[in-house]
Amino acid sequence: MGVLYNTVRRKQNAEAQVMINDLLALGITRARTGESIYDLNYYDLRHELAVAVVTQSNHYRESEGGNE
């Protein structure tokens, strides 16, 4: 494979590890499908993290009584 492809793969693998750590910090070990977060690819991890952050944000706003 090409140098660019390998560089992108390494970057995505590093970012995937950061996303796994972020999901673990939020207490999430499984995707909404029931699959372990360790088995997800980069794009699925990115999606799960985005959903988790939005969900956490909504719960926080609801607990604060705001509806912005």
Image (spheres, rainbow, N blue to C red):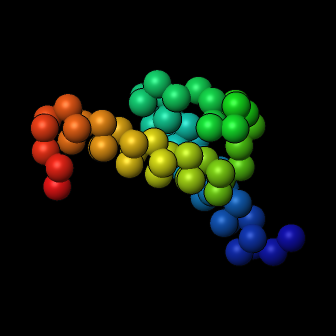
Instruction: Locate residue 21, reporting x and y percent.
Output: 50, 34
Q: Residue at x 14, y 35 (%)?
A: 64
Which corner quadrant holds the N terminus?
A: bottom right
Q: Is residue 56 visible?
A: yes
Q: Residue at x 62, y 38 (%)?
A: 32
Question: Residue 28 location in percent, x, y?
Answer: 52, 29
Image coordinates for residue 35, horizontal then vertical, percent: 72, 33
The foreground one among 25 and 55 is: 55
Tag count: 0
Residue found at the very far left of the displayed protein: 65
For residue 34, above or below residue 54: above
| Front one among 53 and 14 | 53
Q: Is residue 1 above or below residue 35?
A: below
Of the pair 43 and 67, the residue shown nearer to us: 67
User: Does residue 11 appear left or right of residue 19 in this picture?
Assistant: right
* Vertical placement of residue 7 versus 38, above or below: below
Looking at this view, name the residue that lies furthest to the right. 1
Residue 38 visible, this angle: no
Horizontal relation, residue 49 to residue 61: left or right: right
| 19 shown above or below 21 | below
